[in-house]
Image (cartoon, rainbow, N blue to C red):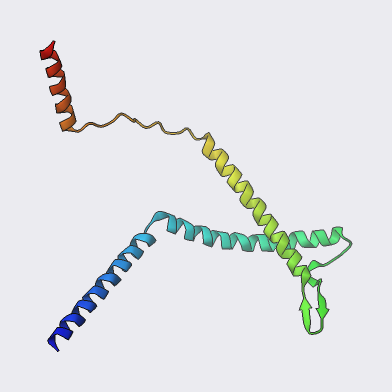
Amino acid sequence: MEKEKKLDKAKVAKAENAVKKELNDFKEFISRGNVIDMAVGVIIGGAFGKIVTSLVSDVLMPLIGVLLGGLDFSSLSIKINNANIAYGAFIQSIVDFLIIAVCIFVMIKLFTAFKKSEPEEVQDVSPVQSDEAKLLEEIRDLLKKKTK
């Protein structure tokens, strides 16, 4: 009976250590800068998506409709039995996607052009020697002088 209690305590301790390790790994992961940057990007991307959707549905699609003779894309649909297939909303979603894709393409092009125009920092690549290496070089040099 006492052996079983020791085994149970060992299992509990092992499980606690595993949970602590996982929590520490998660804490390290979540505290990295790029995770926070990604979260900010997702939030800004969602807001940007709403702006583009409004631009498409409230500005561009009515203008395209006027150019096509007063056609309203939002009302375009086909009714098959009890199903209403709103292909006008689908067309509007395609235009949303294309505008977002063009905006992302332009932003990436600008970013890469800006990145190329920045001067690269030149790093000093001289090797750092340890005290032991310096001492060994001095001994080598002294030995060379004595043999000459």
Residue shown at 78%/84% (left/top)? 82
Number of numbered markers: 0
Residue shown at 58%/62% (left/top)? 47
Question: x, y (%) of residue 102?
Answer: 67, 51
Q: Quadrant of residue 14?
A: bottom left
Residue shown at 81%/71% (left/top)? 76
The relative height of residue 34 versus residue 22 in the rendered view (above or below) is above
Quarter of the rendering occupied by the C terminus: top left
Q: Quadrant of residue 111?
A: top right
Q: In the displayed orientation, state which residue is furthest to the bottom.
A: 1
Residue shown at 34%/30% (left/top)? 124
Question: x, y (%) of residue 122?
Answer: 40, 31
The relative height of residue 33 versus residue 120 in the rendered view (above or below) is below
Q: In which quarter of the image is residue 130?
A: top left
Near-viewer residue (147 or 118) = 147
Question: x, y (%) of residue 97?
Answer: 68, 59
Question: x, y (%) of residue 101?
Answer: 65, 54
Q: In the displayed orientation, state which residue is furthest to the right.
A: 69
The relative height of residue 134 versus residue 15 in the rendered view (above or below) is above
